[in-house]
């Protein structure tokens, strides 16, 4: 479970904001799949919707579903990259801790990674 600092970071990350914007667009397209085209009365006669009007909601739905699947894959890749970066930072901190504790503290405080910042602040107390 992400802590509040992680959540605050993710809410301000341009990549996450872009993904959320695309997700909203995909959801709107998918919701448009339920729209039914309407015919009109023209000069006292009913004119039904054309075949393209009837096909449009299905196309919108398919495009929206495809966008959602692509966004899911992008989110998975982003999460894996964040986990990889987190693990790399922790390993670097551990190595620096062995050789130069001062540099390790400086790295932890400047990393922006909440876990490392908490460790550094705890050790500074």
Image (cartoon, helix red, strand yellow):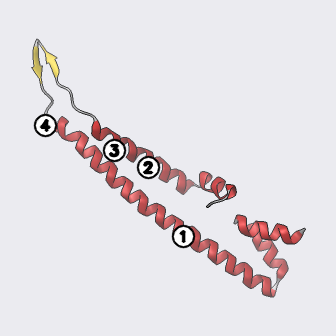
Q: Choose between 105 and 27: the one closer to the eye.
A: 27
Residue 23 is tagged as 2
Residue 69, located in which quarter of the rendered image? bottom left
Question: Which numbered circle lies on residue 51?
Answer: 4
Dot placed on the residue nearer the N-terminal end, 2 or 4: 2
Q: Secondary structure at mark 1?
A: helix
Mark-to-mark CA distance, 2 and 1: 20 Å
Tell me how far mark 1 sits from mark 4, CA to CA.
Answer: 45 Å
Q: Number of labelled discs?
A: 4
Name the residue beneath numbered marker 3: 30
Tag 3's secondary structure? helix
- In this rendering, the answer to whether 82 lies above or below 67 is below
Q: Position of residue 50 (x, y in %)?
A: 13, 33
Point 67% across, 75% down: residue: 89
Label 4 residue SS: helix
Q: Nearer the viewer, mark 3 or mark 4?
A: 3
């Amino acid at each position: 479970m992400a802590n509040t600092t992680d959540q605050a970071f993710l809410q301000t990350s341009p990549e996450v904001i872009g993904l959320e914007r695309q997700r909203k667009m995909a959801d709107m397209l998918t919701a448009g799949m339920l729209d039914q085209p309407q015919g009109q009365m023209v000069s006292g006669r009913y004119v039904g919707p054309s075949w393209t009007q009837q096909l449009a909601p299905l196309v919108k739905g398919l495009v929206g579903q495809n966008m959602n699947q692509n966004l899911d894959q992008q989110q998975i890749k982003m999460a894996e990259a964040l986990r990889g970066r987190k693990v790399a930072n922790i390993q670097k901190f551990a190595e620096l801790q062995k050789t130069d504790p001062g540099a390790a503290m400086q790295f932890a405080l400047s990393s922006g990674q909440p876990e490392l910042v908490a460790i550094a602040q705890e050790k500074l107390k």
